[in-house]
Image (tube, rainbow, N blue to C red):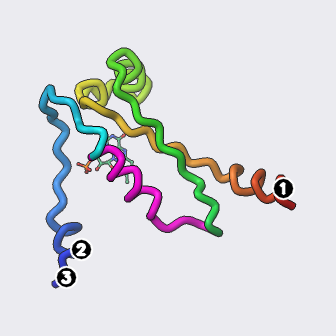
Amino acid sequence: MNETIRTIQNHRSIRSFLDKEVDDVIIDEILRAAQSMPNSINGQQSSVIVIKDKETKAKIAQLAGGQKWVEDAPVFLLFVLDFIKPVLRLRKTG
Ligand SMILES: Cc1cc2nc3c(=O)[nH]c(=O)nc-3n(C[C@H](O)[C@H](O)[C@H](O)COP(=O)(O)O)c2cc1C
C-alpha cells in the first residue's frame, strides 16, 4: 500500500487542541497544499481565511451550531467556495 493511501486510511479527527500558537510557517505550508488541490477549469474557486482572533472564532463556533472546538482551536481556517469568481475573471480578461 502506498503512503498516501495509508495516511488517508489512518486518518482520525481530533477536536481537542493545545493552548499553543501554530507557527505561520506551518500555516503557509497548509495553504500552499490547499492551493495545489485539484479544481475545476483552473478556476481556483476556493479562498482560505486564516482566523486567530478569539472573538471571531467564538462567533463562528456559535453560527456553526455551537461547535466549541472551533473557538478552542488556536487557528481556524475558513474555506470559502466561490464558483462565480472564475466567471468574473474570464469576463474581465475577455
Ligand atoms: C460535508 C462535510 C461537512 C463537515 N462538517 C463538519 C463540521 O461542521 N464540523 C466539524 O468539526 N467537522 C466537519 N466535517 C469534518 C471535517 O472535514 C474534519 O474532518 C474535522 O473538522 C476534523 O479535522 P481533521 O479530520 O483534519 O482532524 C465535515 C466534513 C464533511 C465532508
Residue that protrudes farthest toward the top in the picture: 55
Quick one: label 3 or label 1, which is nearer the N terminus?
A: 3
Q: Disc 3 versus disc 1: distance between alpha carbons?
A: 42 Å
Q: Where is 44 relative to 62, above or below?
A: below
Which residue is rendered at x = 16% and y = 54% of the image?
12
- Mark number for residue 4? 2
Asked whether residue 1 is drawn in magenta, I would say no
| Dot label at residue 2 | 3
Q: Looking at the image, which residue is at 38% across and 21% down?
A: 62
Residue 14 appears left or right of 29: left
Question: Which residue is rendered at x = 59% and y = 54% of the image?
Answer: 45
Where residue 72 appears, as percent x and y from the top left, is: 23, 26
Picture quarter with the N terminus = bottom left
Is residue 22 depicted above or below 12 in this figure? above
Say which quadrant the C terminus sits in.
bottom right
Inspect the image, locate mark 3, and give the three-letter code of the amino acid beneath it. Answer: Asn
Indicate whether residue 30 is drawn in magenta. yes
Label 2 residue SS: helix
The chief SS type of the magenta part is helix
Q: Name the residue under label 1.
A: 91
Q: Distance between the residues labelled 3 and 2?
A: 6 Å
| 33 or 70, nearer to the observer | 33
Magenta range: 26-40
Q: What element carries label 1?
A: helix
Q: Which residue lies furthest to the front in this view?
A: 25
